[in-house]
Image (cartoon, rainbow, N blue to C red):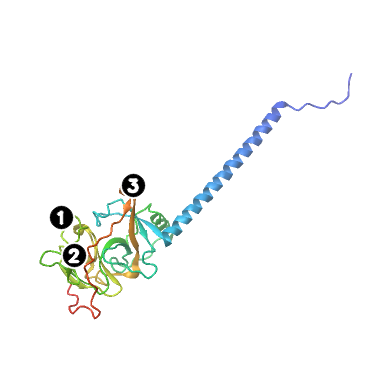
Amino acid sequence: MDTEAHDTERDPSSDTEDGSRSARVSEDSRTTSGRRRAALLGAVCVAFLLLLSHFVVQPFLIPSGSMEPTLQVGDRILVNKLAYRFGSEPARGDVVVFDGTGSFVREQPAGNPVTGLLHDGAAALGLAEPDETDFVKRVVGIGGDRVVCCDGNGRLTVNGVPVEERYVMLGDQPSSVPFDIVVPQNRLWVMGDHRSQSSDSRDHLGNPGGGMVPVDKVVGRADWIAWPFGRWSTVRGTDAFDAVPAAPPGGHPVGPRG
């Protein structure tokens, strides 16, 4: 009897199982690596968009009809945050986004910081409604201007010159509330284009600051409508204030009458 030890042949199925296992491990590794790259790329893109929205251009969701017909509910506008960054200041006719804290709304106690951070991030990307302290309105008067409504023909006047406000919602009066104010330096008198539906400087005449918005509270100028695609366009400027003269250097002889 042949008693010599013979090499045991390897089971072919074992090779197949090892190869399949190796292939699965390699495939899983590639999948995991791909997911990590995708997650990293996504994080980099989000960080870039947040930086862009913080310093350059911020998306802003229009939540109400106070600026119709210029801006519609659901529009996503792009706010140019560099417009007033290098010495320029808001001009009459500009559509601006501003923080109304201290002028349109009172200071609120601090809320949950984590929830606030998540909301600010979503709002910065245009995915959530803006903070309740953020507003979009049109600049009607700048520092030193005397703004009156209305003259004998029902028109708003700035520094004594009637303004033809063709951007105002069809059928709306320039204002159903009469007023006669002088805008302090470094502040703005702002109004919505849909005058009958806009809570603006007129509604805060009796508040601290008299409804005037500090220039340093302006976030930027609304320059573009980015969404929906059917409304993709620039926010049109206006020549309504071209004939308005600068305010007198010594101020107006008649001060605010409210």
Q: Position of residue 136 (x, y in %)?
A: 29, 60
* Amino acid found under the numbered disc labelled 2: Val
Within the image, what quadrant is residue 177 found in?
bottom left
Query: Earlier along the polypeptide chain: callout 3 or callout 2?
Result: 2
* Amino acid found under the numbered disc labelled 3: Phe
Q: Is residue 77 left or right of residue 16?
A: left
Is disc 2 surrounded by few (<14), some (14 to 19) or many (20+) residues within 10 Å?
some
Query: Earlier along the polypeptide chain: callout 1 or callout 2?
Result: 2
Q: In this rendered view, identify the residue nearer to me: 184 or 211.
A: 184
Q: Position of residue 97 (x, y in %)?
A: 32, 62
Name the element at disc 3: helix
Q: Residue furthest bottom?
A: 250
Q: Which residue does the numbered mark 1 point to in the structure image?
A: 171
Q: Residue furthest top?
A: 1
User: What residue is shown at x 34% (from left), y 47% (from top)?
Assistant: 229
Is disc 3 surrounded by few (<14), some (14 to 19) or many (20+) residues within 10 Å?
few
Q: In the rendering, which numbered label is found on residue 229?
A: 3
User: What residue is shown at x 15% (from left), y 55% (from top)?
Assistant: 171
Quadrant of image for the C terminus: bottom left
Name the element at disc 2: loop
Q: Which residue does the numbered mark 2 point to in the structure image?
A: 163
Quadrant of image for the N terminus: top right
* Amino acid found under the numbered disc labelled 1: Gly
Does the residue at mark 1 contact the one at mark 3 (Cβ under 8 Å)? no
Is disc 1 surrounded by few (<14), some (14 to 19) or many (20+) residues within 10 Å?
few
